[in-house]
């Protein structure tokens, strides 16, 4: 394998445009080297992007002034719980201020936005719409329940909500309602306003929200989110979902609960405590949420029947 000449230091550590490379003295022949990937026309980097952050960074070096990542791309960059896993051929969504030139780069799609009402911020050097605006610009491309999951993530104050790269909470119901009022008439506002009605402050994970929505969709009463259990003036547990009046707890067990022996031991001790206090504990996993949560709903309904 032929040895390739090293690139100048400013270009060696990240994506760069061919124009910048030539200005730095790199030859066109060197830019055709097999050691460089070509994620976009006029862009080179040392390795093929393997994450949305790397792909976005590759496009950012050629992004037009005023443009910003929007829609599902911005949501992924914020760590919001979008409904499907990222794949390398997913088009980047580029937000384009109304009345400005659109990008036509292969591997992208554009979304026009009103720059007077949607704010652009910077995250790790990337320009993108702020979290609520990111969700708004994808609201017409997800289901109503998927949108509630996203809004719950905006509203959560919990530091251990997985994956989020935004302040907690990113919004309150009041600030989000005000934002949607400011955006009145824009695409996605009606859907996001409906999702806000169904959203609840305090969700601990996307799966917890999905579990709650499955229960409600089946016609069961809505459980309380993050119910606190106190014993003799001491808070002993915080339940994912609960029917406090019936002493029924619904606990979602993510993969870390099943794979971490220490966490598993804590979960067992927690269940023992709750049962000693007269609670019925329904423990749910990802499998219980398949097929509209039929398994979870059946178990919750059975627990409620036991209290009848």
Image: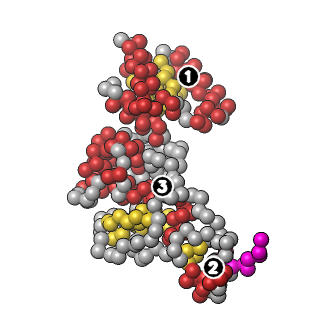
In the rendering, at what x and y percent does residue 253 appear? Answer: 54, 32
Q: Earlier in the sequence, mark 1 or mark 2?
A: 2
Q: Which residue is mark 3?
A: 76
Task: Locate the N terminus by quadrant.
Answer: bottom right
Q: Earlier in the sequence, mark 3 or mark 2?
A: 2
Label 3, label 2: how many angstroms apart (C-alpha)? Answer: 30 Å
Q: Quadrant of residue 29?
A: bottom right
The local crowd at label 1, few if under 14, some if 14 to 19, many if 20 or more residues have their Cα within 10 Å, is: many
Please name the predominant secondary structure of the magenta segment in the image: loop
Task: Locate the C terminus by quadrant.
Answer: top left
Quick check: 237 above or below 128?
A: above
| Callout 1 touching callout 3 (CB < 8 Å) | no
- Callout 3: helix, strand or loop? helix
Q: Residue furthest left?
A: 185
Q: Which mark is residue 202?
A: none
Q: Which residue is mark 1?
A: 271
Q: Which residue is mark 2?
A: 31
Instruction: Specify whether residue 242 is in view.
Output: no
Residue at x 55%, y 83% (from the top left corner): 19
- Callout 2: helix, strand or loop? helix
- Callout 1: helix, strand or loop? helix
Q: Nearer the viewer, mark 1 or mark 2?
A: 2
Foreground residue among 98 and 237 = 98
In the rendering, at what x and y percent does residue 6 appear? Answer: 72, 78
**Residue 60 vs residue 13: left or right?**
left
| Callout 3 touching callout 2 (CB < 8 Å) | no
Residue at x 25%, y 59% (from the top left corner): 186
**Residue 216 vs residue 21: left or right?**
left
Residue 200 lies within the magenta run: no
Q: Which residues are magenta?
A: 1-7
Q: Earlier in the sequence, mark 1 or mark 3?
A: 3
């Amino acid at each position: 394998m032929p040895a390739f000449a090293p690139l100048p230091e400013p270009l060696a550590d990240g994506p760069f445009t061919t124009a910048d490379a030539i200005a730095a003295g790199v030859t066109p022949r060197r830019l055709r080297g097999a050691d460089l990937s070509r994620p976009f026309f006029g862009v080179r980097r040392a390795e093929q992007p393997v994450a949305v952050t790397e792909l976005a960074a590759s496009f950012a070096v050629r992004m037009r002034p005023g443009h910003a990542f929007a829609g599902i791309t911005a949501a992924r960059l914020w760590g919001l719980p979008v409904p499907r896993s990222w794949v390398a051929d997913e088009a980047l969504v580029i937000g384009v201020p109304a009345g400005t030139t659109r990008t036509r780069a292969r591997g992208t799609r554009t979304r026009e936005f009103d720059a007077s009402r949607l704010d652009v911020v910077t995250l790790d050097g990337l320009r993108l719409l702020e979290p609520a605006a990111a969700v708004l610009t994808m609201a017409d491309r997800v289901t109503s329940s998927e949108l509630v999951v996203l809004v719950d993530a905006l509203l959560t104050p919990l530091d251990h909500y997985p994956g989020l790269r935004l302040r907690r909470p990113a919004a309150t119901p009041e600030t989000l309602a005000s934002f949607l009022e400011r955006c009145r008439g824009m695409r996605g506002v009606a859907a996001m306003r409906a999702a806000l009605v169904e959203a609840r402050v305090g969700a601990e994970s996307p799966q917890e929200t999905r579990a709650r929505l499955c229960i409600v969709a089946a016609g069961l009463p809505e459980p309380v989110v993050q119910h606190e259990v106190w014993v003799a003036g001491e808070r002993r547990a915080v339940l994912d979902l609960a029917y406090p009046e019936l002493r029924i707890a619904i606990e979602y067990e993510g993969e870390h609960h099943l794979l971490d022996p220490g966490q598993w031991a804590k979960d067992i001790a927690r269940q023992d405590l709750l049962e000693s206090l007269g609670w019925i504990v329904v423990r749910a996993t990802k499998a219980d949420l398949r097929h509209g949560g039929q398994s979870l709903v059946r178990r919750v309904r059975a627990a409620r029947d036991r209290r009848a």
